[in-house]
Image (tube, grey):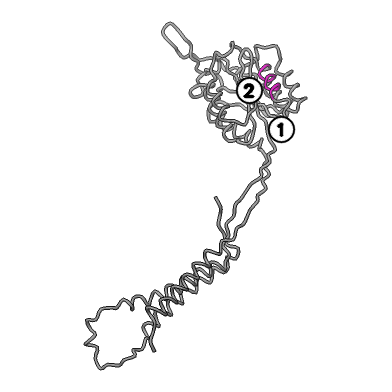
């Protein structure tokens, strides 16, 4: 939809002259001298105001309208259409998410896995210009969604993640390796992996540090997030009497996660609740900003002609009334 502006907006100040013109007209009406002098006006006391007396004020109204439209035409009204040419220095991001059984612990609301999914989706929505993908891992790893700019599809795939998709365990090394395989050939300015886990590597054939060394050779930066409260966390355990909560020890291999982040020029974070995890994603969002160059193009179209025509019409109507219906006979 076009925008409207004035090339010479200072001319609009002339519209202020309408106020003294109206004041002058009102004062002039009060000082009008009668052409016939009578000793008394008693005979005209009940006389009705004629149609011509009302109509004569319309002449002045047309004059004001004509002046207003001429001022608007002098200010050169223009319509503009804008186009934007956007170039992006893209950032490709793979989220590698732990979906092992320990992610069902309820020190997060409703549990670690659901909190991780929800808050990651918020992070994705805040980065519309980046390609993003998803890798999940427990005892093994696989790609849930390759790099894409269709974030709606990615978020829908996030919603489908649940415990039990693959055998249980914590294969951190394979979670990193699968993410590397998906992002290593990217031509993006920055290649990022966000690794979220709540445990210690106990599965898979690739050691986490080995995977981090591979990431480093490809220039991939890894942000690691350890998820879990300090000490113990409530965990749902099925029993003969139904599911009951038991306290389990929180074990996160923080030294390994810190080393992975340090080796790849990333950063390690510890999330102990939903809000802390949300703050971590916000910090990563600030650290990895997409640069956008915008060139704007404008096409101008002159719109003064309708105002000139309206001014001419007002002038014509004023003259028509003045020399026909309201014509003065000397």
In the orientation shown, which residue stands out farthest toward the front?
A: 324
Q: Position of residue 131 (x, y in %)?
A: 64, 31
Residue 188: mark in rendering: 1
Residue named by callout 2? 96
Q: Residue at x 42, y 80 (%)?
A: 323
- Image height check: is 169 above or below 276? above
Count the labels in the image: 2
**Which type of secondary structure does the marked residue at label 1 adopt?**
loop
Q: Residues within 10 Å of mark 1 (few under 14, many from 20)?
A: some
In the orientation shown, which residue stands out farthest toward the top?
A: 240
Can residue 180 be found in the magenta stretch? yes
Find the magenta span and give its range. Answer: 174-182
Q: Residues within 10 Å of mark 2 (few under 14, many from 20)?
A: many
Q: Position of residue 117 (x, y in %)?
A: 55, 25
The answer to which quarter of the image holds residue 289 is top right
Q: Position of residue 246 (x, y in %)?
A: 48, 13
Q: Earlier in the sequence, mark 2 or mark 1?
A: 2
The answer to which quarter of the image holds residue 95 is top right
- Image height check: is 57 above or below 91? below
The CA span between labels 2 and 1 is: 18 Å
Q: Residue 2 versus residue 177: which sits nearer the camera?
A: 2
- Image height check: is 114 above or below 61? above
- Relative placement, left or right, of 260 versus 321 is right
């Amino acid at each position: 939809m076009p925008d409207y502006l004035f090339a010479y907006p200072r001319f609009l100040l002339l519209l202020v002259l309408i106020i003294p013109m109206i004041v002058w007209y009102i004062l002039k009406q009060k000082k009008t001298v009668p052409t016939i002098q009578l000793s008394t006006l008693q005979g005209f006391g009940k006389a009705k105001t004629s149609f011509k007396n009302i109509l004569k004020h319309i002449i002045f109204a047309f004059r004001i309208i004509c002046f207003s439209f001429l001022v608007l035409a002098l200010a050169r009204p223009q319509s503009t259409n804008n186009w934007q040419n956007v170039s992006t220095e893209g950032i490709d991001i793979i989220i590698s998410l732990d979906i092992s059984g320990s992610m069902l612990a309820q020190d997060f609301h409703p549990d670690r896995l659901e909190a991780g999914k929800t808050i990651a989706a918020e992070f994705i929505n805040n980065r519309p210009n980046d390609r993003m993908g998803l890798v999940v891992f427990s005892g093994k790893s696989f790609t849930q969604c390759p790099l894409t700019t269709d974030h709606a599809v990615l978020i829908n795939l996030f919603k489908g993640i649940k415990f039990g998709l693959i055998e249980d365990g914590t294969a951190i090394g394979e979670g990193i390796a699968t993410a590397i395989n998906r992002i290593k050939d990217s031509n993006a300015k920055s290649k990022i992996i966000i690794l979220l886990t709540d445990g210690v590597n106990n599965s898979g054939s690739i050691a986490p540090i080995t995977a981090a060394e591979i990431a480093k050779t490809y220039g991939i930066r890894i942000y690691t997030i350890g998820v879990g409260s300090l000490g113990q966390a409530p965990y749902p355990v099925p029993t003969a009497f139904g599911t009951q909560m038991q306290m389990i020890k929180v074990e996160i291999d923080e030294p390994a996660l810190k080393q992975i982040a340090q080796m790849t020029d990333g950063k390690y974070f510890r999330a102990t609740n939903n809000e802390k995890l949300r703050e971590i994603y916000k910090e990563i969002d600030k650290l990895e900003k997409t640069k956008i160059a915008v060139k704007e193009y404008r096409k101008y179209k002159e719109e003064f002609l309708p105002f000139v025509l309206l001014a001419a019409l007002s002038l014509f109507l004023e003259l028509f009334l003045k020399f026909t219906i309201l014509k003065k006979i000397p």
